[in-house]
Amino acid sequence: MSVPAAEARCRSGIAARLAGVPVTTLRVWERRYRIVGPPVSAGHHRLYSKADIRRLALIKQLVDLGHPIGPIAGLDDAALDALRGETQRLPGAVAIRPRLALVGSRQLTEKLGADLGGRGFAIAARLDPHAAAGGLEGCRATLLVVEFASLHEAGATRTLELLRASGAPRALVLYRFAASAVIRRLRAAGHRVAHATADVLELEALCLAATEVAEAAPVARPAVPAARSPPPPRFDEAALAQLAGSSRSVECECPAHLVELVTSLAAFERYSADCRAQSPADAALHATLAQAAGHARALMEDALEQVAVSEGLMPATRADRR
């Protein structure tokens, strides 16, 4: 099937993210049920339209409400929408829509806010992007939706302030232009980050996906201790060269291998520190990389010292002084 040039389409990974459906689930749905059946590019990639993404999001919501995928896969969009309304009106139906605090343009806080309200979302608060965060105090939101024309470090700081004021556990951060390091950092903290949209169904899917604990709130495991800097290098170049050379006289080659690892990690540590100075936009990212490399280098230095003592290449007294 040919793809109209004027119609913007996206590949399965982006479509799955926008619809709040895991990519593996989307592939199974397509293979077994053909719930969308998008055209395929010359490179054999499925290309999804906005209408396809709306349909995927609608089916995902119905599955979340307890409907098995098989019976609903063949329904048209109107029937799916009607079924969702009927299900949500049932006695004891579980409310899966978050309570939103909206911060951003009038398009978001007024038009899209009204549309989301009509689709069952509770709008806890609406705030102008330049207003004080205190305007959200006491709103008891379960999701902060904040929009930035340009997302940089100040936007990440602003998001944290708004989260504290609103009481929301996580945020959906929308942007038009953004620094990649800031996007990565917000996502690593468990927040959803996506391009700003004027489509209410797309925004609805993003809000629902942002509140899915399994996807949106992964357990954060810092690569390195945030409050502790790595120790300075324990060996200079001469000492490393001596240990690497000495290992040739014994059967075990571990000292030479460990020297290579320590040297490489130290080099990457210096490289990341240099990048931090040269690229202000990515300064925090490269500071984290330098810190991670430094702690990894220190661990390998511990291992090198243990092996060197075991092989008689250095006295045990030096290792005992740590």
Image: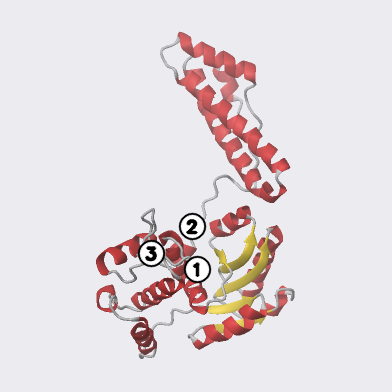
Amino acid type of the residue tagged 1 in the rendering: Ala
Residue assigned mark 1: 6
Residue contact between numbered discs 2 and 3, judged by CB atoms under 8 Å = no
| 277, above or below 70, in the image | above
Q: How many marks?
A: 3
Amino acid type of the residue tagged 2 in the rendering: Val
Characterize the local packing of mark 1: few (<14), some (14-19) or many (20 or more) Cα atoms within 10 angstroms: few
Residue 2 marker: 3
Q: Position of residue 177 (x, y in %)?
A: 64, 62
- Residue 284 visible from this viewpoint: yes
Residue contact between numbered discs 2 and 1, judged by CB atoms under 8 Å = no
| Residue 94 placement: quadrant | bottom left
Amino acid type of the residue tagged 3 in the rendering: Ser
Residue assigned mark 2: 219
Task: Tell me the colour scheme of the image.
Answer: secondary structure
Find numbered disc 1 in the image and state the secondary structure of the residue it sits on.
loop
Circle nearer the N terminus (2, 1): 1
Quarter of the figure with the C terminus: top right
Q: Position of residue 6 (x, y in %)?
A: 50, 68
Judged by depth in the image, the label closer to the viewer, 2 or 1, is: 1
Find numbered disc 3 in the image and state the secondary structure of the residue it sits on.
loop
Circle nearer the N terminus (2, 3): 3
